[in-house]
Amino acid sequence: MFVAGCGTGNSTTAGAASENEGEPISGGTARVLQVAEPQSLDPAKLSNTWAHMATLGNALYGTLMINNIENFDIEYKMATDFSSTDGGKTFTLTLRPGLTFTDGTPLDAAAVKYNWDRLKDPQIGSTAGRHAVQVASSEVSDPTTLKVTLAAPNPYFAQGLVAGAMNWIASPTALEKGTTSFDENPVGAGPFTLVNWTRQSDIELQKNPEYWDAPKPYLDRLTIRTAHDANQRMNAMTTGAADLASESSASNIRKAETQGLRYEVVPTGGGQIIAMNQRRAPFDDIRARQAVQLALDPDNLNTVVYNGEGAVPTSLFPEGSPYYTGAPLPETNSEEAQKLFDALAAEGKPVSFTFMSYPASESKMLAEAVQAQLSAYDNVDVKVEMHDITNAHARTASRDFDMSITSAIVQDPDYALWTAFHSTSAGNFMGVNDPELDAALDRGRVSESQDERVDAYTAAQERLDELAVGVWYTRATPSVTYGDNLHGVTLYTLGSPLPEELWVS
């Protein structure tokens, strides 16, 4: 699943989360559920979204900076500045002096450069590579200063940086010892260090006594476990077996409310997409994409996958967004869909493809629901293949899929839309290649006028509809649920919790 990140307001909060929680108390343990199992603790292999391993990455490596989910302002952590004076052509990153990794080596400008350069290596296969490749070059000016030149101007580059592994810096000395050694002893400068990792089970972490932002972290220990299944996560939360769960299920948010649990949901536009790979048959023919888009009923998919409790996007930007125009997304038309399937079959090109899905229950149900809906049409055949997260990421990165679940989850629109759909973006997994769309996305990226950006992204939405890039089937729910005993829950980017802020009562 690739995620690229304009929200519309405050996060949604339930219960006592909005109350004054008092002064933090030090000590204790929190038990956290994440949605995806890591295959390595190398930050390049971790993904910083609610649907993956955000808490783990933040715990081991800390953050250079974060964004405020209400207004998207950049707030600094281990960095003290990341600014441009030339419209996003170059940036200067300034670090706090004296930062060190837990192996005693310096977290300095050279270490940041090493990590960012490494992410660009296709052999590493990091999902953050699509952001890192925007850095054409970087130069260490002094231990706390890195000068960065982008391949093309991007005033909003920091929004992408905070949403991926560029925000997590590991010790170059430890990384150079290889994956096996690093997984046994991952070295960062985060609020926690590894005690033990049992694959497919618990990741035990303890407080880093040398953490730069003392007296944080407040917790003595943190236990992280993966729970792919939405019912398993909710059961753990309602029985008190877990204190916080990253959540990808809209249904679970509704259940949390009825069960008296607290929750936070990051507001977003865009959403998750049933995506079609335009680089190969059958979806290199726009008629095949249009046929599938017209054939699939997102409301029915919502009923099957989310018990009707998900939010089906009706426009790219939600009401309240400065980019909202009311322009609708494409709607279902089964009669026109069948005409297109028949026309392709008459040319000897019946639509046949494989849906590559993931082990999470919602993903599996979606793939099977798509297969069931399309089985009602003639001249279309759908197979479903299940892949674990790591293999699916690799297949997606190599563009080896017909249909998959992807997303363009919109906070500031540049990061999400440019990354997912610009022809030169390394994150354009669907192979969208349209000069008119590129021009609109480029205008939105470089303009510092809000009116010009609105015009640009209106044009981009119109072109995306015409190109039939996929089916926007649900708004994303970057979220966490948590119990009354846990406090200090703070999210940034796409539902990424800051574990140093957590404390228990």
Image (cartoon, rainbow, N blue to C red):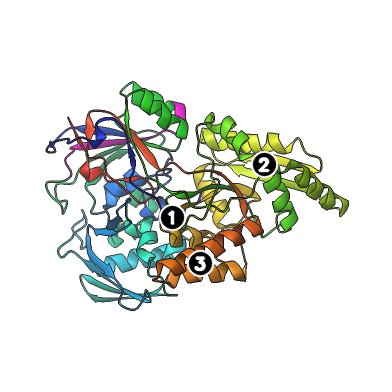
Residue at image coords 55%, 38%: 363
Report, in whole angstroms, how far the alpha carbon at label 3 lies from the one at label 1: 17 Å
Helix, strand or loop under label 3: helix
Is 455 left, or right, of 64 in this rendering?
A: right
Q: How many marks?
A: 3
Is 79 left, or right, of 291 in this rendering?
A: left
Residue at image coords 68%, 43%: 332
Residue at image coords 15%, 52%: 213
Report, in whole angstroms, how far the alpha carbon at label 1 lies from the one at label 2: 25 Å
Asked if residue 279 is positioned above or below residue 239 in the image, the reply reads below
Q: Position of residue 343 (x, y in %)?
A: 84, 51
Q: Which mark is residue 456?
A: 3
Q: Position of residue 487 (x, y in %)?
A: 22, 35
Q: Which residue is mark 1?
A: 5
Asked if residue 503 is positioned above or below residue 464 in the image, the reply reads above
**Any part of residue 106 in sight:** yes
Report, in whole angstroms, how far the alpha carbon at label 3 lies from the one at label 2: 28 Å
Q: Tell me the kind of residue under disc 1.
A: Gly
Q: Tell me the kind of residue under disc 2.
A: Leu
Q: Which mark is residue 296?
A: 2
Q: Earlier in the sequence, mark 3 or mark 2?
A: 2
Q: Position of residue 367 (x, y in %)?
A: 62, 38
Residue at image coords 79%, 47%: 341
Quarter of the image that includes the C terminus = top left
Based on the picture, tell me whether residue 229 belongs to the magenta stretch: yes
Magenta stretch bounds: 217-231
